[in-house]
Image: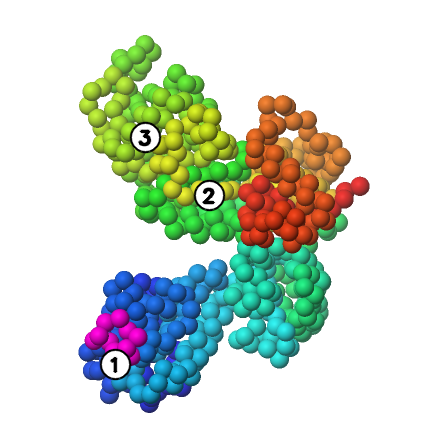
Amino acid sequence: MDSLYEQIAGSGYALLLADTSGIILCEKIDPTLRRMFVQAGLIVGAQWSEQREGTNGIGTCAAESRPITIHQSEHFRSRHIGLSCSAAPIHDSSGRVIAVLDASSVNATGSREAQMHTVALVNSSARLIEKCLFLRRHQADAVLRFHHRPEFVDLLHDGALAVSSDGVVVAADLTSLRLLGAKDPRDVVGRSIGDLFDTTFGELLAASVACRRAIWQLRDNLHGRCYFASLAPGQHMGRTPAAQPHAARNAIRITGARADAVLTLQDLAGDDPVMLRNVRNAQRVADCAVSVLIRGPTGCGKEAFARGIHLVSNRCKRPFIAVNCAAIPETLIESELFGYTGGAFTGARKEGMRGRIVQSSGGTLFLDEIGDMPLPMQSRLLRVLEEQEVTPLGSEAAVKVDLRVICASHRNLRELLARGMFREDLYYRLNGITIELPSLAARRDKDALIRKCLASETHSHEAACIEGAAFERLVSYHWPGNIRELRNTIRTSLAICESNIIRLADLPPEIREPGVDRVVPPAERDVSLEGAEREALLRVIEKNGWVMSHVAAQLDISRNTLYRKIKRHGIPLTREPDKH
């Protein structure tokens, strides 16, 4: 802002920074003109949203998310017709508008076209701020910067991709999307460097270590367009080409961590793009009245994610109470949830019981496997949620509660709804925002998760090792039991291994021998519509050789719709290598 102000100083302009609600946060104004700007309302603390002031530079820029000039009579309010305002949005690394940069004059002369120079300067400065924010946000990641012209690489107008240690894109700035011809960040984020360009992340990392700040020529795989690129390794990435640790043949040493450490949302997200997006959404609704429904396969960490939401909310100092609706017998679930008075039924405690709902008052009630809750209990739960009070069994007096409920299910509640097994009114009361947790096999940071699990299952004062071949099998295994199966496998392997070194022979047969799959009982087989769609989608993907543009064309759907379906079904974005 200092640099931009020096360029416009003396021209009668004030430089303003506002948030997305139009509130001015920072100003740079010529002291001799301050009184005029104060009278015009262009001061710190003033709100210039479209809802409050109508069409204006700051508010309209925030609403339309594009550089804009609002000149004199284009303002909605007649008292602002002397103003000329040129504004540009500032985006964060996920493409969301987070601020507006504005240059305003209270007595501008000349035509609207005369303001083109000003809006160009403001827009250029906004892009520079975005680039700095992106690079600072992703200091721990590798950053690939590229452009069609080599002299623009590592400058303001290049594109930037943040890349995790396994070569997967975790963030893309707006310029990189434009250069690649992508319409949405989801077309790029979650894909490997090898999917996008005619090289691999390992090759780029090795070359950058050997020759720092070098520029290489790349081509994108979709259109064959030529780019020039540089790669800056992340702060925590090694100086040697160890970008693919699971390929190492030597034993990998893991330092133990505290097993009782509470997992935060950031811990749970790791470096997986889908999980990072889930965490951002969870943080935004943590203190809101918005209901949260967590979906995902059994064992993927739904309760841990719900506890993470509780820990970042303003209820974190109050209890987190978890109830597994599928594990409690139907005859007991009513008393477990709603509580009872002494002597309410045969076998009841003499002193009664408060019930899980009352226990969670002021904190968070987590209802796992909500799809298995009996219909009569669903009706009572809906009444409790609506009235924020509960009547224990055997009592006529209602107890007021301050209730926040997070629900989870591995089942498709819409299918249960259609079959009459779940109440429609309760579904829409609980389904404010749905967070889909990916399976372990679909996560892009699987190798890092395995390392974390090894560390958590090893005593903090010790270290464990795992042979490279054993680590490869853990990474390549499809993990039908997800994180729960991973933890149990590692715990068992550590218990039976010799000298605290996990070898191939210490792993279960289905993991040790790639061709041996676990026999899935009929009750566990996915016979739902979701499963049928997944199988059909996989057949089309295989037929088209995993070229997603061809798949989208054959199915007559957009690439965005295709990637949403792929994410929902937990299908990897690249073909798994032949293991034979």
* Residue at 49% across, 31% down: 415
User: What's the distance in space between the residues labelled 1 and 3, CA to CA?
Assistant: 56 Å
Viewer-closest of 217 and 511? 217
Residue interval drawn in magenta: 72-81
* Label annotation for residue 382: 3
Residue assigned mark 1: 82
Residue furthest to the top: 346
Is residue 164 shown above or below 212? above
Quadrant where the C terminus lies?
top right
Q: Quadrant of residue 146?
A: bottom right
Give whichever of discs 2 and 3 has the lower sequence position.
3
Residue 15 appears at what percent x and percent y?
Answer: 33, 78
* Residue at 72% across, 49% down: 545
> Disc 2 residue type?
Ile
User: What's the distance in space between the residues labelled 1 and 2, CA to CA?
Assistant: 48 Å
Residue 383 appears at what percent x and percent y?
Answer: 29, 29
Residue assigned mark 2: 435
Which secondary structure type mostly characterizes the magenta part of the structure?
helix
Is residue 566 shown above or below 525? below
In terms of secondary structure, where does tag 2 sit?
strand
> Disc 3 residue type?
Leu
In terms of secondary structure, where does tag 1 sit?
loop
User: What's the distance in space between the residues labelled 2 and 3, CA to CA?
Assistant: 21 Å
* Residue at 62% across, 43% down: 571
* Label annotation for residue 90: none
